[in-house]
Amino acid sequence: MWCAWPLGPYPVGAVPPVPLAAPAYPTRIVRDG
């Protein structure tokens, strides 16, 4: 499965392209996948 991310999709469980931006989308990263 893939989660939505401002910079593009990435595999669930993988480190987002911008780790520092993760706190800005916690719900999206956890639930959107």
Image (spheres, helix red, strand yellow):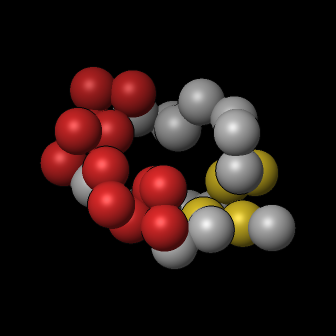
> Is residue 4 in view from this perspective?
no
Instruction: Provide residue 12's location: percent of width, then percent of height.
Output: 71, 50
Instruction: Provide residue 20's location: percent of width, then percent of height.
Output: 27, 26
Q: Is 13 displayed left or right of 7 in the figure?
A: right
- Image quarter where the N terminus lies is bottom right
**Residue at left 48%, top 67%?**
31
Question: Does 22 appear above or below 32?
Answer: above
> Is residue 20 in view from this perspective?
yes
Question: Does 33 appear above or below 30?
Answer: below
**Residue at left 28%, top 55%?**
25
Q: Is 6 displayed left or right of 16 in the figure?
A: left
Question: Does 7 appear above or below 22?
Answer: below
Q: Is 31 displayed left or right of 9 in the figure?
A: left
Question: Does 32 appear above or below 14?
Answer: below
Q: Is 16 displayed left or right of 18 in the figure?
A: right
Task: Count the numbered circles shown.
Answer: 0
Check the image and name the residue furthest to the left. 24
**Residue at left 51%, top 36%?**
17
- Image quarter where the C terminus lies is bottom right
Instruction: Provide residue 30's location: percent of width, then percent of height.
Output: 48, 56
